[in-house]
Image (cartoon, coloured by chain):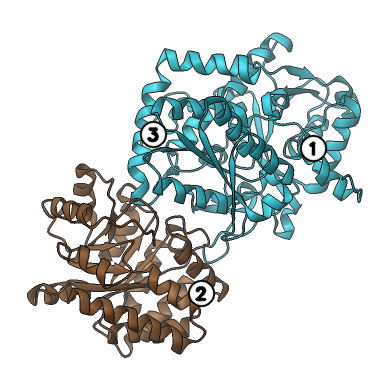
Chain colours: A brown, B cyan
Amino acid sequence: MQNRIQKTMAALAETNRKALIPYVVAGDPDLKSTLEIMHAMVDSGADIIELGVPFSDPMAEGPTIALGHERALAAKTSLRKILELVAQFRQSNNETPIVLMGYANPVERFGYESFAESASQAGVDGLLTVDLPPEECEQLNSHLQEKGIETVFLVAPTTTEERIKSIAQRASGYIYYVSLKGVTGAANLDSEGVNARLTEIRNITSLPLCVGFGIKDGVTARSVSEKADGVVVGSVLVDAIGKADSTAGAVKAVSDILSEIRAAIA
Amino acid sequence: MDNRPLSKQVPNAQGRFGEFGGRYVSETLIDALDQLEAMYTRLSSDPDFQDQFDKDLAHYVGRPSPLYFAERWTEAVGGAKLWLKREDLNHTGAHKVNNTVGQALLAKYSGKKRIIAETGAGQHGVASATVAARLGLECVVFMGEDDVKRQSLNVYRMKLLGATVVPVTSGSRTLKDAMNEAMRDWVTNVDDTYYIIGTVAGPHPYPMLVRDFQAVIGREARKQSLEQMGQLPDALVACVGGGSNAIGLFHPFIDDEDVAIYGVEAGGDGVETGRHAAPLTSGIPGVLHGNRTYLMEDEDGQIIETHSVSAGLDYPGVGPEHAWLKDIGRANYVAINDDEALAAFRTLTRVEGIMPALESAHALAYAEKLARELGPDKNILVNLSGRGDKDILTVAGIDGIEVL
């Protein structure tokens, strides 16, 4: 059975469109706002939603998203509550795939098996655990696969060919290509380099390739979308949410950014 | 069944100490860690590198550090003989420099011109800035904003040594956040930057290589014990924050089954109050800063803030080798509260004329208890990991005295 990510990616490929994948931190600034933002993102052209699971020590995030994690934790957001949020979202949207992106410790504390079970029931489609590279993921992945949850992995500019092969064997849903050496939200996007790397990765795996880190507007999105199957947009959205003075303001800011990018990548 | 001596069993090729350790990092850091591991594997068996390291330890750090029989302290406590391994006499005043000298050599051999480090109390930052000055390398030290305020003297020391100190404003603004920020810098500047981690934590190969550099403490102590006591000590005692001075002492004794091993964590206000820094005593296994180990965390898996009078023990995790030693039962881990450590600080200062770091004072306080338990025929070797000058303002503050 195809899950929502595979269905979405197949449908996009058929019409030659690129996946627009916004990332926001769940519970930033609170879960009620996140629910509204999620629906608004779909209305503005989002194909898949990545929900950041806040962690006290988000080592791979730049300052913008790290602040989003802090705001969400200040609002007492937990993994359990995020699964309730997803279940609530599913009451009126049963199509848009949801990928949780976070760190190992909260999932571990929840319990791998129990997490896979609860996430699947809530309607989660994929999980990207930033600090579980292929060497450390076996246990969690077997539980996720059993429940039909896709395991998304990062590939970095420094990842060797041999590692890409090993990652591709364990990955499902899509591969998240990190566009630059650095943390989320960095400024130094090299689109030519990205396109060359994507061509190399394409020779190794048939999984869809989505690019993230450093994409902040229509121009940067278009510059990498030529060879990619999708783009991930995160820091610019989390920044807008942090600056908004109301949920309505956050919803509007996020919608405006996504509409522009949607138009640019078609 | 692994028939090798315990000390040779860890870490395995994946950087595991039993179920602990490993490499829990973002894919963006893997290549840098692979390169570091390959370089370290090559250099650790290169006689030229080892020779350079030994020379630096002898002529720059001032090793070997003495093993000192604390006769008046032994009398005052009234029990087993108490011996001090004098890491406080090293250049810069603590064991930290053993590791920074070793890692600075790695930086030099790798051709990188910039080193970065995280620091809590500032001791590792100072030790890093020191070796950077000696080798003419750029040095950036990340330090939690709260620690920058609490440790202004060390901040100025680092600046005098030519380092840039970056105050970290994220999270709880302490050591763990400084480590996050250093990792973020490293992943961004990996081509020209070497990251000197200050303790036996972090992703593989750091827990192994920091241990190897610090193990000079235990090798010397073992030899000195045979010469001065005429036997191996009955027990070793060292304080454990991240755990580098402790592993440095313990590791060369791990196969000596008759030597009891005690690691002393920071009990803060008391482990029962929740305000402490004792993950081995009351934490559970989890994943932080690239390794699996015992952690202080809440029911949602978020890392919680720690409390200790000594900034150097104020860390919510602990090196994975300690987690392993605890689980296999080779070492015992106990906690000493702030007030007990302060009492030991005062005792040693008054009866021996040696002012210990507050971190080391935790080990001293436990050694006093153990000495009374074991009785006069036994020998206890305590790692005096650092000197206490840096803590004078803290102690004065507790005494309600304005020094400056």
User: Looking at the image, is B80 positioned above or below residue B288?
Assistant: above
Chain of the residue displaying label 3: B
In primary-sequence order, the first of circles 1 and 3 is 3
Which residue is disc 1 drawn over? B365
Q: Are marks 1 and 3 in contact (CB under 8 Å)?
A: no
Q: CA distance from mark 3 to mark 2?
A: 37 Å
Q: Nearer the viewer, mark 1 or mark 3?
A: 3
Mark 1 closeness class: few <14, some 14–19, many ≥20 residues within 10 Å: many
Chain of the residue displaying label 1: B
Looking at this view, is B216 or B377 the one in front? Answer: B216
User: In the picture, which quadrant includes the N terminus of chain A?
Assistant: bottom left
Q: Nearer the viewer, mark 1 or mark 2?
A: 2
Instruction: Find residue A13 and report its horizontal and vertical position in percent.
Output: 11, 72
Instruction: Find residue A32 and report its horizontal and vertical position in percent.
Output: 46, 85
Looking at this view, is B325 or B159 the one in front? Answer: B159
Instruction: Find residue B392 and report its horizontal and vertical position in percent.
Output: 82, 40
Badge 3 marks a residue whose secondary structure is: helix
When asked about the image quadrant of residue B203, the answer is top left
Q: Are marks 3 and 2 in contact (CB under 8 Å)?
A: no
Report whether mark 1 lies on the same chain as mark 3: yes
Q: Amino acid at mark 1?
A: Ala
Q: Amino acid at mark 2?
A: Thr
Chain of the residue displaying label 2: A
Which residue is disc 2 drawn over? A77
When asked about the image quadrant of residue B340, the answer is top right
Badge 1 marks a residue whose secondary structure is: helix
Q: Amino acid at mark 3?
A: Leu
User: Looking at the image, is B57 positioned above or below residue A53?
Assistant: above
Residue B36 image label: 3
When asked about the image quadrant of residue B72, the answer is top right
